Image (cartoon, helix red, strand yellow):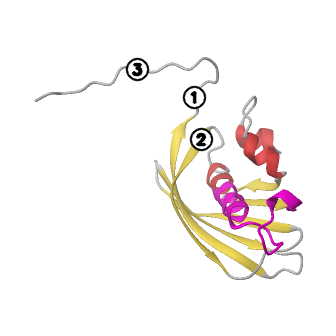
Amino acid sequence: MWDKAVGFGVEIPFVQHLGFELTQFEDGHSEITYTARAEHLNSFSVTHGGAIMTLMDVSMATAARSKVPEMGVVTIEMKTSFMQPAIGPLVAKGELMHRTATMAFTQSTVFDAAGRKCAHATGTFKFVKRLPTGAKSSNPINISTD
């Protein structure tokens, strides 16, 4: 399913490292399952907040992209609330709430195995054209001294 979501030949090593599994990618919705490994826990032995934020960021981005899979998105802002410890297998449900030609307004909630809400986020994403992968190049910056 990631091939459909991110395009052929595009990899997100951090997402692969965390072991996210995309289980829904359609009509402004996404669902990602995740079980934290020992190295993803904090000092309280619960899923680290950074891993939870990444899970919600990716679920919101995939929800936004589900309407226009040929485009990429970049996170502009994200607001996160943690409600209770996230323990065990987790599910993030992302939703595209509104979109314009260039922006996506989204939300995501992370649920534990018992269906309890552990964290919630809202996020704003900018749609960008996917650039070909390969050798890096750049255009010169036009600087005006006026």
**How many neighbours does mark 2 have within 10 angstroms: few (below 14), some (14-19), or many (20 or more)?**
many
- In which quadrant of the rendered view does residue 146 lie? top left
User: Along the horizontal axis of the image, is 23 left or right of 62?
Assistant: right
Q: Are marks 3 and 2 in contact (CB under 8 Å)?
A: no
**Sequence-first tag of 3 and 2:** 2
**Residue annotated with mark 2:** 72
Task: Tell whether label 3 touches label 1 (CB within 8 Å).
Answer: no
- In the image, the segment drawn in magenta is 35-60
| Disc 2 secondary structure class | strand
Position of 103 with respect to 56 (left or right) is left
> Residue drawn at (69%, 64%), measured in percent from left and top?
94
C-alpha distance separating marks 1 and 3: 14 Å
User: Which quadrant would the N terminus be assigned to in this image?
Assistant: top right
Give residue 81's position: percent from left, percent from top.
Answer: 61, 76
Residue shown at the point (81%, 65%) measured from the top left? 41
Name the one closer to the observer, 35 or 93.
35
* Residue picked out by circle 3: 139
Q: Quadrant of residue 93?
A: bottom right
| Residue bearing mark 1 | 131
For discs 1 and 3, the disc positioned in front in the rendered view: 3
Of mark 1 and mark 3, the one earlier in the sequence is 1
